């Protein structure tokens, strides 16, 4: 043994440490509580996936330990002890090679069969049918959730910014997109599927929510385990506020600490007061600039809380409060108590405000303004106007009767004003429309030119002072862009370039066309495009 | 001026070039010698690798802490795509093409590649292609849709920037270049093998280049067609609706075409690495490769299976359950030939006489860590698990264990292994080992925690993230900086040793090299061999251990 150069021990030792470190890391990672655990825990199908993951991870860890162990042994046992070492050659061994080929194959088939079990049990629609359907519609960069109820239910469909579901109900989630591909992702509930424009993808789930977060036997499919499911958010890495496993939550359990930059988590959750658990949901497929800022709340409620929440949504808890609108828009002139001042008339006891026959006059002056008074029609939506008018007509001793948003909408139509219904999008600032439109217009310059002057007016019309472009009504322009002017005789005459654009994009393009090249027509809001498109369809 | 005294293929061809460095340089840049072109490829790959590394550092800097650090979201969104493009198309693939150019003609006993001018053309497409691909940096209009470029996000409506058109064009050019190189390799190996060099006598590195070339030939046209369709949609809006549902197209069609190329591309990036490891393990263990025939067939199996698994990148797009079951089983099957290779390397080392020089360290590190990447691939093959982990950092960890601990470490192994043959000099062994240790450790520091982030639900390509992931991201960012610094050691070692290293022997690795490149002078002469070589067939079939017949016995 005396012939060993010292350095060879060193390199052997070094290699030993290397492999030991490499071997240690995954082992330790699995040993740290919670760190090797899978994401989805709070729905039946999520737990099946978690069990499947744990099974595969254990198999893989075993294979890893065998491989690294053999490697480590080979490094130590077969290191070169002398420069004259000449090992015995072998070129293979059929039994050994066939052995590990078949072993690998067998292992893979085992994993595959276990996977198929879980796939069918989690993806096949439930035998007892769906209790509720929710449509998740993605757009850059927000989610809209549409709630629909069975026909005999009697409740109106509505839209909301969060995914709210009742616990222990089969939820049928239809996922689609208005523009690019997104993907809905709620890690805790094991929800993930792409939102593809032109497609309706389905994901169904049954969340635990605040009710007894244990593995219930009636939807245990991998093995009928009865024991409480372990708490999953490890105490080491997450605030351990949710330690107990088998319990019933009363009140709101908040698990959302972060909602991106555009949505504030806030001191008080909007779901305070319901028996519910909040989870974080987001977008998983790269969808443009603010892909990382599409967080939403996924809220699972008890059935009774959910029913209450739906009622609250439908009965306008979120609708504007007249007093608040008045304070913000009107009080600066008319005073907090409606008495006005030297210039601005008092609302207390004014004829227009207390006379039931003059209700429409009241609405009209708010919509269109008069003299000094600003027109609030373009600023406030129908519900806000109705709320503020009702506030004025029932406060400070006034008793002039009340209206609702439909009255405002009807009068708008009568007066030829633009519709501005409740819950419609806020008007987009013209600057933003122009900026977006300019970018979109770059696709048009090949024919229409950077300055809107066609290179060949015979074939391609100029856009500057073009009658269709600057017309008061943009219906025709929208129609040309969306439907094109192709005919059998003249294919390609004007292609339907806007067919795939969103309403915002088309409105931006229109605004840009109407405000550039010396044109001076008013901007176009997305809501107008929506209406025209609806008519076209 | 001092005369250039380099030997072998490095020696100037004309009298003028001996004294004039510019002429010597021109001789290099216009050389049709596969060895010189190989070195050009390697130098180009090195530069682009550093560029890609810097991009990854920018990404990790932005992610080092919660909140906004240095960029706005638009620029950040461009970075992952640019990093991937630089690393895949301009670092890994050219690096292996470079090693292949140098080694393959010698290993088959040929004086040069079959089409030397095509070879030079294939290389010279790359630098302009890189310029075109990354034109967005100069135009300040980088594509912000990742390297996958899924429409509708990548069409002209949502990504109207010019840089995206240049990017697509650059990738098409790269496809042309690698197709030319692949044709060249195949023609060389099939037509120019020397006497005695049957197909199943070929060294495994050459085998891996053959299989990779078939993959490139079959897969690249599909990517090119997908990119052309995308370009047509972009440049003629409203005319073409391949991927636009409103016009009767389908965005999922693009994903099918893209992954039909990009899944085999994963094997294009790792198979030559497998070949390198087979050479290195065999040489430094003083043993013939264990189960040579099965090793060759397992590469062919990987290549064939690689073409029928593409949809496993698309499990969340809503394709039918039955289709996913099929693709899942095929995906899992790929683990079998890959496992055969790992076990065969272990069996090659078993009973050997293993010397741990830097190439062998990298080979052992590769086997140890690539196994982690392979096994996380098995986890990802399972459909329900994949759906939950799709587009999270788990996938990021997986691809980096495969491409950094896999492709990059095998490129390092190959570079160190053939360095004495390529330059005629010996690199600095001490710094080589330091480089290995830092690389091995910091690959794990950088990427291991990303498994955890993914399993806890942190999506990839996020500009800002939930603060609960901050500590892990910070560690990952520190690791990436150290990993990059370690790679600079490699660069300095390579450049410095070429100038000042000790002279290398012909069969430098203790006389253990058995392939033809170790039997000719160092560095090789302009046409490799002075007279047509003859390969003395070695035993490639199974021989039971007690039978003599191996290399060392044959010498007796």
Image: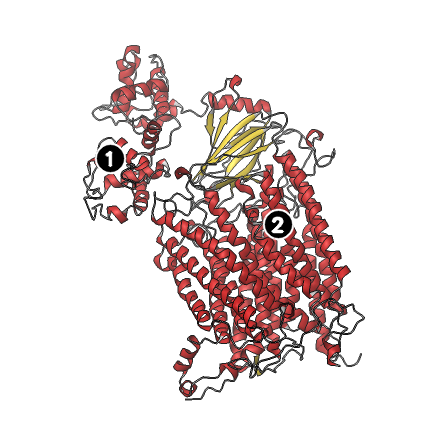
Give the total number of marks visible in the rendering.
2
Quadrant where the C terminus of chain B sits is bottom right
Q: Residues within 10 Å of mark 2 (few under 14, many from 20)?
A: many
Residue visible at 60% across and 53% down? Answer: B305
Residue visible at 62% across and 46% down? Answer: B328
Hey, which quadrant is residue A410 in on the image?
A: top left
How far across and down, in percent of the image, does residue B508 sit?
A: 63, 80
Residue A350 visible? The answer is no
How far across and down, in percent of the image, does residue A191 sit?
A: 57, 37
State the mark number for residue A487: none
Q: On screen, A533 above or below B516?
A: above
Q: Which residue is mark 1?
A: A522
Pointer 1 chain: A
Secondary element at image label 1:
loop
Q: Is residue B419 left or right of residue B117?
A: right
Q: Nearer the viewer, residue B202 or B310?
A: B202
Hey, which quadrant is residue B195 in on the image?
A: bottom right
Q: Is residue A173 left or right of residue A37?
A: left
Residue visible at 74% across and 33% down? Answer: A226
Kindly check if marks 2 and 1 are in contact, taking CB atoms under 8 A apart as contact: no
Quadrant where the N terminus of chain B sits is bottom left
Q: Is residue A224 left or right of residue A251?
A: right
Q: Nearer the viewer, residue A404 or B30?
A: B30
Secondary element at image label 2:
helix
State the mark number for residue B331: 2
**Which of pointers 2 and 1 indicates the residue nearer the eye?**
2
How far across and down, in percent of the image, does residue A286 sit?
A: 47, 46
How far across and down, in percent of the image, does residue A429 sit?
A: 31, 38
């Amino acid at each position: 043994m005396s012939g060993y150069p010292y350095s060879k021990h060193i390199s052997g030792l070094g290699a030993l440490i290397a492999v030991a470190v490499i071997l240690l890391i995954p082992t330790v990672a699995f040993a740290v509580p919670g760190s090797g655990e899978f994401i989805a825990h709070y729905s039946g199908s999520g737990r099946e996936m978690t069990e499947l993951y744990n099974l595969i991870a254990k198999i893989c860890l075993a294979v890893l330990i065998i491989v690294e162990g053999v490697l480590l042994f080979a490094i130590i046992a077969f290191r070169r002890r002398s420069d004259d070492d000449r090992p015995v050659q072998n070129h293979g061994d059929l039994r050994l090679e066939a052995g590990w080929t078949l072993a690998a194959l067998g292992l893979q088939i085992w994993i595959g069969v276990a996977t198929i079990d879980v796939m069918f049990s989690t993806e096949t629609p439930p035998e007892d049918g769906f209790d509720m359907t929710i449509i998740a519609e993605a757009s850059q960069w927000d989610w809209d959730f549409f709630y629909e109820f069975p026909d005999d239910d009697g409740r109106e469909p509505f839209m909301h910014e969060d995914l709210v579901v009742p616990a222990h109900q089969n939820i049928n989630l239809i996922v689609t997109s208005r523009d690019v591909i997104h993907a809905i992702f709620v890690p805790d509930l094991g929800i993930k599927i792409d939102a593809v424009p032109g497609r309706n993808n389905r994901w169904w789930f049954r969340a635990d929510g605040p009710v007894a977060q244990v593995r219930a036997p009636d939807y245990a499919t991998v093995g009928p385990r009865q024991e409480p499911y372990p708490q999953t958010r490890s105490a080491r890495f997450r605030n351990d506020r949710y330690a107990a496993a088998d319990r019933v939550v009363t009140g709101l359990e908040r698990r959302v600490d972060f909602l991106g930059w555009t949505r504030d988590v806030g001191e008080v959750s909007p779901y305070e007061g319901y028996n519910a658990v909040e989870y974080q949901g987001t977008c998983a497929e790269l969808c443009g600039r603010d892909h990382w800022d599409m967080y939403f709340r996924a809220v699972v409620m008890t059935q009774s809380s959910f029913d209450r929440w739906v009622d609250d949504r439908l009965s306008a808890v979120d609708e504007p409060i007249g007093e608040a609108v008045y304070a913000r828009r009107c009080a600066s002139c008319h005073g907090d108590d409606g008495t006005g001042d030297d210039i601005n008339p008092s609302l207390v006891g004014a004829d227009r405000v207390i006379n039931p026959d003059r209700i429409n006059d009241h609405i009209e002056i708010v919509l269109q303004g008069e003299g000094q008074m600003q027109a609030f029609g373009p600023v406030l939506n129908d519900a806000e106007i109705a709320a503020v008018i009702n506030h004025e007509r029932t406060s400070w001793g006034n008793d002039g009767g009340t209206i609702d948003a439909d009255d405002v909408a009807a009068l708008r139509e009568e007066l030829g004003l633009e519709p501005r219904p409740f819950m419609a999008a806020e008007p987009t600032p013209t600057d933003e429309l122009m900026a977006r439109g300019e970018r979109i217009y770059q696709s048009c310059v090949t024919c229409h030119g950077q300055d809107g002057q066609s290179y060949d007016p015979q074939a391609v019309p100029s856009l500057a002072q073009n009658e269709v472009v600057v017309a008061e009504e943009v219906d025709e322009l929208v129609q040309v862009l969306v439907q094109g002017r192709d005919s059998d005789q003249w294919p390609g005459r004007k292609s339907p370039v806007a067919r795939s654009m969103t309403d915002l994009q088309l409105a931006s393009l229109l605004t840009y066309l109407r405000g550039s090249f010396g044109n001076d027509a008013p901007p176009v809001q997305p809501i107008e495009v929506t209406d025209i498109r609806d008519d076209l369809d | 001026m001092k005369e250039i005294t380099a030997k072998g293929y490095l020696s100037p061809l004309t009298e003028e070039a001996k004294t004039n460095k510019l002429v010597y340089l021109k001789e290099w840049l216009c050389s049709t010698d596969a060895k010189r072109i190989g070195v050009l490829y390697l130098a180009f790959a090195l530069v682009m690798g550093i560029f890609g590394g810097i991009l990854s550092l920018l990404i990790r800097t932005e992610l080092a802490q919660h909140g906004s650090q240095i960029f706005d979201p638009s620029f950040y969104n461009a970075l992952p795509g640019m990093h991937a493009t630089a690393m895949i198309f301009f670092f890994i693939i050219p690096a292996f093409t470079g090693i292949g150019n140098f080694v393959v003609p010698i290993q088959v006993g040929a004086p040069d590649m079959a089409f030397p001018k095509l070879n030079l053309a294939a290389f010279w497409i790359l630098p302009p292609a890189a310029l075109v691909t990354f034109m967005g940096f100069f135009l300040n209009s980088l594509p912000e849709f990742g390297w996958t470029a899924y429409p509708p996000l990548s069409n002209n409506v949502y990504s109207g920037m010019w840089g995206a058109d240049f990017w697509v064009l650059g990738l098409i050019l790269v496809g042309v270049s690698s197709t030319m190189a692949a044709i060249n390799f195949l023609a060389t190996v099939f037509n120019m093998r020397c006497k005695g060099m049957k197909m199943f006598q070929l060294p495994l590195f050459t085998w891996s280049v053959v299989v990779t070339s078939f993959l490139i030939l079959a897969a690249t046209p599909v990517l090119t067609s997908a990119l052309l369709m995308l370009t047509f949609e972009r440049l003629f809006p409203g005319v073409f609706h391949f991927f636009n549902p409103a016009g009767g197209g389908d965005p999922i069609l693009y994903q099918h075409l893209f992954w039909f190329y990009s899944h085999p591309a994963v094997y294009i990036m790792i198979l030559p690495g497998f070949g390198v490891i087979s050479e290195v393990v065999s040489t430094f263990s003083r043993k013939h490769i264990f189960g040579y025939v099965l090793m060759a067939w397992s590469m062919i199996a990987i290549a064939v299976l690689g073409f029928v698994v593409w949809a496993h990148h698309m499990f969340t797009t809503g394709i039918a359950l039955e289709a996913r079951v099929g693709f899942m089983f095929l995906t899992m099957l790929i683990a079998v030939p890959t496992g055969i290779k790992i076990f065969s390397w272990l069996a090659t080392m078993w009973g050997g006489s293993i010397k741990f020089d830097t190439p062998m360290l990298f080979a052992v590190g590769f086997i140890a860590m690539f196994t982690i990447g392979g096994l996380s691939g098995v986890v990802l093959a399972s459909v329900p698990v994949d759906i939950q982990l799709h587009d999270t950092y788990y996938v990021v960890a997986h691809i980096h264990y495969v491409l950094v601990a896999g492709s990059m470490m095998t490129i390092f192994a190959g570079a160190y292994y053939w360095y004495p043959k390529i330059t005629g000099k010996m690199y600095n062994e001490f710094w080589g080992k330091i480089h290995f240790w830092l690389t091995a450790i910091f690959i794990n520091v950088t990427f291991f925690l990303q498994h955890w982030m993914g399993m806890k639900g942190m999506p990839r390509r996020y500009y800002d993230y939930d603060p609960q992931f901050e500590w892990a991201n910070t560690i990952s960012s520190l690791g990436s900086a150290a990993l990059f610094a370690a790679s600079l050691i490699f660069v300095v070692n390579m450049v410095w040793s070429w100038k000042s290293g000790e002279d290398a022997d012909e069969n430098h690795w203790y006389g253990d090299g058995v392939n033809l490149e170790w039997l000719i002078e160092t560095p090789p002469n302009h046409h490799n061999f002075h007279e047509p070589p003859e390969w003395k067939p070695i035993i490639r079939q199974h021989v039971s251990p007690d039978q003599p017949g191996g290399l060392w016995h044959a010498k007796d």
